[in-house]
Image (cartoon, rainbow, N blue to C red):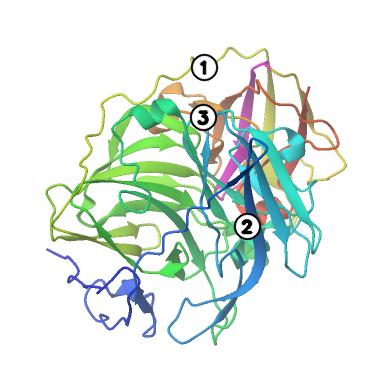
Amino acid sequence: MKRRTFLKLSSMTAVVLFTGCGDDESNIDQGSADVLAVALPIPTLLHSTQRNGVMHYDLNIVEGNHQFFDGVKTKSYGIDSSYLGPTLLLKNGETVSVNYTNNLKEDTTMHAHGMRLPGTMDGSAHQVIKVGKTWSAQYTVNQNACTNWYHPHYMGKTAEHVYEGLAGIIIVEDSESSALDLPNRYGVDDIPLVLQDRKFSADRTEMDYSPTNMELSRGYIGETFIVNGAIAPTFDAEAKEIRFRLLNGSNSTMYELGFNENISFKQIASDNGLLEAPVSMSRLLLSPGERAEIVVDFTDAAAESFTLKEFRHDKTFMTINVKDTATAVTTLPDTLASLEPVATPVRSRRFELDMAGMGRFTINNKVMDLNRIDANLNQGEAEEWEVVNKMNVDHNFHVHGSHFRVVSRNNNTAAVKKSEQGYKDVVHIPPNESVKIIVQINDVTADANAPFMFHCHFLEHEDHGMMGQFTVS
Ligand code: C2O
Ligand code: CU
Ligand code: CU
């Protein structure tokens, strides 16, 4: 048995100096003696104010100082916070106005990743929020329950702005999913986990964003793994089913997630919605920008401790201490949602991901150009997109405004795992492999002044050219 000793915190906000290095799971202290032992920070749920039938969410993008290490203030960005931002809880059918005020000393944007919005409300590189200005995304939520997120999309600076701390979770709720017996008490048994990794300057007063050409290509991977802005925090879980909403919020690190002792868990949702049925697994691979909701059953684990691990880099994200009590027990249903049949495509397109010299990443041999439209789609028409990774490194592919379906990998339909047969907006493409997806945009449009984007979500690749634009009319 290699379980961590139970580290008891006197309250949810208690901060005590971590002293537990030296055991065989000492990578939990990320190689540093001055890591704080903190309770898992839960991003606050942002309350909206209703004005004229519209739910307004007001957010301030600010500079801050975040405490990652004991006694050290690290310069950071955040949204109404020193690092990351509050969680937005949006209900399907509701008309919202998400108002971002830029209090930074530089321009940025704020994109609602996974939301089906008109191009003008997308918060892409075309909707710049100037220093001191407020930009509002107004729209009616029109999609199924899922876990989305918001983050900057400023041309050439997305990676840096996200690295500094700009990102937050969007939870979409609908009546079908609320009627299911799923854990849905936010912060109690329904827990968002923004997973990231960071490098710090030697004195840790700054995060160190300085990728080399090699790191631009292979990934800018920090040695310090963090969850919700904390290093190796502890979560006290009720002895029941717990739902974790996992976001790979890293710039360019693949996360192979699981727990110590290979305990199994069930994936219940992919990027844009519930799966048809829970899928059992003990490892979950998430590429940057992807989300997965999982349910772990701690019913029979009272007083035990677990760790959420990342196996590709042998890191520990967090410790879970199971309490000996549970309230409001849930029972995961066998069926979760009925998915629409995959549409028959009326045309096909091919996108080749490659590079053209050091630090220049391309799609179909072109680097991103804000003034070029790469594809025009017709609303309601399904298309088959083949995305080919021509390189020897991992890539993925994200499409704005759409929920796509993955239909084959390397032309093999059987290679598409159950867990990726639901609605997706990011798909991983391993080195030298290809994937086919069906893209269909039914409800929204995007014109040449505010087009949608498709890109690799490894942010270093995106910022250095691996992105294109499309209209929907
Ligand atoms: Cu999450 Cu175009 O981005
Ligand atoms: Cu997006
Ligand atoms: Cu890439």
Q: Position of residue 183 (x, y in %)?
A: 31, 41
Determine the residue located farthest toward the front in the rendered image: 52
Residue at 42% from the left image edge and 49% from the top image edge: 246
Q: Residues within 10 Å of mark 1 (few under 14, many from 20)?
A: some
Could you say which disc has been placed on residue 342 in the image? Answer: 1
- Viewer-proximal residue among 255 and 422: 422
> Is the N terminus in the top left, top right, bottom left or bottom right quadrant?
bottom left
Left or right: 145, with 376 as reference point? left
Residues under labels 1 and 2: Cα distance?
34 Å
Question: Identity of the amino acid at label 1?
Answer: Val
Residues under labels 1 and 3: Cα distance?
18 Å
Residue at 30% from the left image edge and 49% from the top image edge: 189
- Label 1 residue SS: loop
Magenta stretch: includes residue 397: yes
Question: Identity of the amino acid at label 2?
Answer: Ser
Chain-order first, disc 2 or disc 3: 2
Q: Residues within 10 Å of mark 2 (few under 14, many from 20)?
A: many
Q: Position of residue 172 (x, y in %)?
A: 50, 38
* First to last magenta residue range: 380-398
Q: Position of residue 350 (x, y in %)?
A: 68, 28
Q: Which residue is mark 3?
A: 410
Question: Identity of the amino acid at label 3?
Answer: Asn
Asked whether the viewer can see residue 465, the reply is: no
- Label 3 residue SS: loop
Asked whether the viewer can see residue 352, the reply is: yes
Magenta stretch: includes residue 219: no
Left or right: 256, with 363 as reference point? left
